[in-house]
Amino acid sequence: MEKLKARNNNLCELCNLNEPTIAFTVSPKSDEDINHQVSLCDTCHSKLNHENESHYWRCLEGSIWSETPAVKALSYRLLQNFKNEDWANNTLSSVDVEEEIVNWAMSAFEIAAVHKDAFGNILENGDNVVLTQALDVKGTNFTASKGTVVKRIKLVSENAEHIEGKINEQSIVILTKYVKKQ
């Protein structure tokens, strides 16, 4: 924490007013790398999830210009919460933020793909499912019959409509609309 405090002369890296007490890691980073952290005072940390505090966050007009990528990413992310307000919109349009920093900042707003079975039940890695209808398995010479149990499925991260499983010792991709969670 001492190196982090020293980076901004023992001041919070967002408001630049108070002494920092918290080493805040900017998600989705999860490590203790100082390059992924921002030194925050108690006030800034307590207001992080209060979107109705736009007057407080005007300090971001200064912190967005930081040379520290984590500070810039967190500032950009917080400014997005107030982009419908003139001050925040003007700030966002006046600064040129690198694409890598924007992607880091905006990753907080990404919605993870949710895999659901034919009945809307949420599927997770390792679940067992039952086929709700007979399926011709492409690239093989068999049909998986209705009622076949597929154990320990794997979710396909790129597509919420696909899961992977084994039938007859063959690894196959199955559409989630044809399975029921067991």
Image (spheres, rainbow, N blue to C red):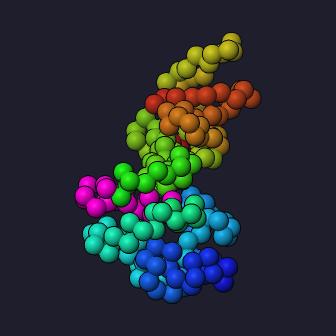
Up-down relation of residue 110 to residue 166 (above or below) = below
| Residue 118 shows up from this direction | yes
Pick the residue in front: 72 or 164: 72
Compared across the picture, whether 148 is left or right of 160 comes to right
In the rendered image, residue 109 lying in the magenta stretch gets the answer no
Q: In the rendered view of the protein, which quadrant contains the N terminus? A: bottom right
Residue 31 in percent (x, y) is at: 66, 66
Residue 29 in percent (x, y) is at: 61, 60
Q: Which residue lies furthest to the top in this view?
A: 141
| Residue 179 shows up from this direction | no
> Residue at the location (63% across, 47% down)?
126
Q: What stretch is highlighted in magenta?
A: 73-90
Residue 127 in percent (x, y) is at: 59, 46
Compared across the picture, whether 53 is left or right of 152 comes to left
Q: Residue furthest right?
A: 169
Residue 158 in percent (x, y) is at: 56, 36
In the rendered image, residue 83 lying in the magenta stretch gets the answer yes
Q: Main secondary structure of the magenta part?
A: helix
Q: Quadrant of residue 47?
A: bottom left
Pick the residue in front: 111 or 2: 2
Q: In which quarter of the image is residue 17?
A: bottom left
> Residue at the location (33% across, 70% down)?
58
Pick the residue in front: 124 or 111: 111
Up-down relation of residue 109 to residue 48 (above or below) = above
> Residue at the location (45% across, 63% down)?
64
Up-down relation of residue 72 to residue 12 (above or below) = above
| Number of marks present in the image shown | 0
> Residue at the location (48% across, 82% down)?
41
Q: Residue furthest front?
A: 94
